[in-house]
Image (tube, helix red, strand yellow):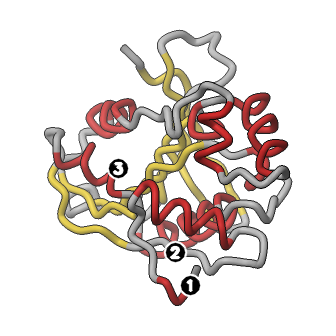
Amino acid sequence: MIKTQAEANVPTEHGNFRMIAFSENENDWMPHMAIIAENTDFSKPVNVRFHSECITGEVFHSKKCECGQQLDAAMKYIHENGGIIVYLRQEGRNIGIINKLKAYSLQEKGLDTVQANLELGLPADDRNFGVAIEILNLLEVKDINLLTNNPEKVKYVVDSNIHLNSRIPLQIPANEISKGYLQTKKDFFGHLLDDNDN
């Protein structure tokens, strides 16, 4: 069972947030995080984003995915409207950065993001959003608006003890490199994406 290990106020370029680290033990160097806007009203449906770590997109601004832009957009949104980002340490759909770079190498040879994972003997998507539900329960969140395009995240909430009030799209327009990646998200994973933007 995870529990709160540390928390502090962190000022960012998007605003001030309360950041809480969750893990099973205090020596975990890669805990999951809750990033909570200071104006969040827990008596109303809380705006929530489940966001999986993506070092290539968030830190190095890779054009292969929209992860970094989605995180920025989510932080801006929850700063303005209140809410929580549940930041999950599930790099590369939970295959890790080494396997992610191996998959990138296969994509350079013509495979798409799903085909590359399968070629490596890995799942297309190995993420588990149950820990996000666990974190929301620890924060005593009962009712949410979920910022997502991913129907799997919606399903996790619907199947949990947390009420899904609404889904808020969080779509980033495609660039010349990410276009195929986003199309695979739509075709294989059923992401709720507008064709005009990908």
Dot 3 or dot 1, earlier in sequence: 3
As drawn, the label of residue 197 is 1
- In the image, residue 151 lies at what x, y percent? 33, 57
- In the image, residue 131 lies at what x, y percent? 38, 30
Gap in angstroms between the C-alphas marked 3 and 1: 21 Å
Report whether 85 appears left or right of 139. right
Rate crowding at label 2 as few (under 14), some (14 to 19) or many (20 or more) other CA atoms within 10 Å: some
Dot 2 or dot 3, earlier in sequence: 3
Quadrant housing residue 15: bottom right
As drawn, the label of residue 153 is 3
Rate crowding at label 1 as few (under 14), some (14 to 19) or many (20 or more) other CA atoms within 10 Å: few
Which residue: 26% across, 35% down? 137
Which residue: 31% across, 37% down? 133
As drawn, the label of residue 171 is 2
Up/down of 165 relative to 154, above or below:
below
Q: Amino acid at mark 3?
A: Lys
Label 3 with label 1: CB-CB less than 8 Å: no
1 or 2: mark nearer the eye? 1
Label 1 with label 2: CB-CB less than 8 Å: yes
Label 2 with label 3: CB-CB less than 8 Å: no
Report whether 52 appears left or right of 27. left
| SS class, disc 3 | helix
